Amino acid sequence: MSNEPFFRREGDHFLPNPISRGPWNETSLHGRVVIGLLGAEIERRHGDAQFMPARLTVDMYRLPDLSPVEVVTRIVRDGRRIKVIDAEFVSAGTSMARATCQFLRRTANPAGQVWSPPPWDAPAPDDIEPLPDSRQILGGMWTIRPISGAMGSLGPRRLWMSEVRDLVGGEPLTPFVRVAVGCDFASPFANAGEKGLAYINSDVTLYLHRLPVTRWVGYEVVNHGATDGVAIGECFVHDERGPIGSATVTALAQTIGMKS
């Protein structure tokens, strides 16, 4: 498997490599690279070790092709305890997606216990048999270790995912970018059915109370609902030490080659 990055940087622009193509149209980018690049540039330009990137919301309202990309960011609020950053994904001179990231200052938890769901009882990724390369998805965008269920199965679905390539050539993935690139997976994992995936997500919101500390990120489907061709899906997100947050999407009924 070649580890070609999704983008290469050229000045202020990002040039997509062929591996960045998505499943809906052979000339368009995958949503994961759009989300990942917005998150990466927000963190690179505005990140601060004292602040936690607690929420990243990305609206995807057009399918960008493989034209050069520019990311434009804007500070909405730069406060003592909260920072809010907007970003725009511009391809071929046209706005294709936008993001808002909320950074919260790290402090200490208040005293006392608060109920939360128990950590999942998943085996460690290294204890699960790897899938052969022939079963990797979309030419090897990522690698997985299945835990329970499968894409489209009628029952609980859980798996581990690990990124196998850089988002931007020569720029190693940070913990935040690692989970930002992967969180788009919540849509197919939660919204695929027994006849395959027929929903394209128009957004994703990633909530984090801490960053992943290992290369493996776990996804556990906890919700799906759909009416009149509009769907929602949600996954709890884990790393090997426990829960780290959740990823939620909205999606539209879609067929291959259909314009969004």
Image (tube, helix red, strand yellow):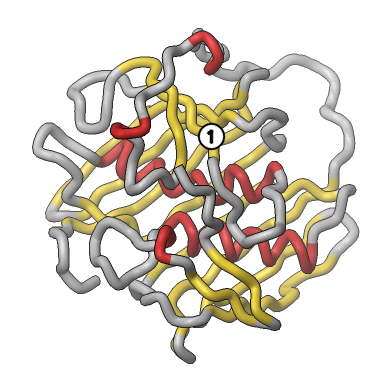
Question: On screen, 98 above or below 94?
Answer: above
Count of picture labels? 1
Q: Quadrant of residue 157?
A: top left
Q: Residue 260 vs residue 36: left or right?
A: left
- Identify the secondary structure beneath mark 1: strand
Identify the residue under disc 1. Answer: 162
* Image position, residue 153 (x, y; %): 20, 25
**Identity of the residue furthest to the bottom in this view:** 93
* Image position, residue 93 (x, y; %): 48, 91
> Around disc 1, counting alpha carbons within 10 Å, would you say few (fewer than 14), some (14 to 19), or many (20 or more)?
some
Quarter that holds the C terminus: bottom left
* Image position, residue 108 (x, y; %): 88, 31
* Image position, residue 176 (x, y; %): 67, 46
Q: Quadrant of residue 48?
A: bottom right
Q: Quadrant of residue 109?
A: top right
Residue at 39% of width from left, 16% of height from top?
A: 147
Question: On screen, 33 above or below 141?
Answer: below
Quarter that holds the N terminus: top left
Question: On screen, 195 above or below 4?
Answer: above
Nearer to me, 29 or 103: 29
Question: On screen, 254 above or below 172?
Answer: below
The amino acid sitting under disc 1 is: Ser
Residue at 74% of width from left, 15% of height from top?
A: 113
Nearer to me, 224 or 13: 13
**Identity of the residue furthest to the front in this view:** 2
Residue at 46% of width from left, 41% of height from top?
A: 142
Nearer to me, 259 or 167: 167
Residue at 22% of width from left, 39% of height from top?
A: 192
